[in-house]
Image: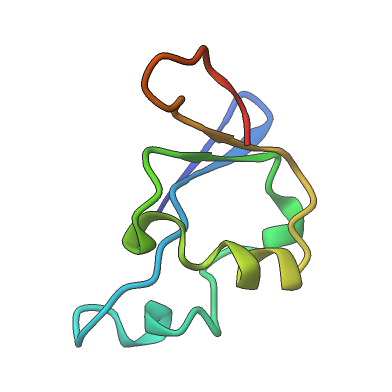
């Protein structure tokens, strides 16, 4: 999970569930290091749980913007 903040936009790159002791605060997603309601968009690199597993919690905490993802093989890019 990486927050890109610049040019008047806040974009989150991936929103996964972290497994194990690496990041106890974000393991269950109870505390985000930003206000989800202030995000303009989320960009997912792919659909593994460690990259998108916290999307439901992000939405429950106020995110209302678009979610962009990479296309499936043979499709053009689109909003998820």
Residue 61 visible (yes or no): no
Q: Is residue 37 left or right of residue 17?
A: right
Up/down of 62 relative to 8, above or below: below
Image quadrant holding the C terminus, namely top right
Q: Residue at x 78, y 65 (%)?
A: 62
**Residue 9 image-quadrant placement:** top right
Closest to the observer, 14 or 80: 80
Q: Is residue 9 left or right of residue 33?
A: right
Position in image of residue 5 (x %, y %) = 54, 38
Q: What count of labels does the image hold?
A: 0
Up/down of 53 relative to 19, above or below: above
Which residue is farthest left? 21
**Residue 11 image-quadrant placement:** top right
- The coloring applied to the image is rainbow
Q: Residue at x 62, y 73 (%)?
A: 57
Position in image of residue 30 (x %, y %) = 55, 85
Up/down of 13 relative to 71, above or below: below
**Residue 58 image-quadrant placement:** bottom right
Q: Residue at x 38, y 38 (%)?
A: 45
Position in image of residue 29 (x %, y %) = 50, 78
Closest to the observer, 26 or 7: 26
Q: Residue at x 68, y 61 (%)?
A: 36
Image quadrant holding the N terminus, namely bottom left
Position in image of residue 14 (x %, y %) = 43, 49
Residue 29 visible (yes or no): yes
């Amino acid at each position: 999970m990486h927050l890109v903040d610049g040019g008047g936009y806040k974009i989150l790159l991936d929103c996964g569930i972290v497994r194990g002791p690496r990041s106890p605060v974000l393991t269950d997603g109870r505390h985000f290091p930003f206000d989800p309601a202030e995000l303009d968009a989320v960009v997912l690199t792919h659909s593994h749980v460690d990259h998108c597993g916290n999307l439901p919690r992000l939405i429950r905490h106020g995110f209302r913007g678009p979610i962009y993802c990479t296309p499936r093989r043979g499709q053009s890019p689109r909003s998820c």
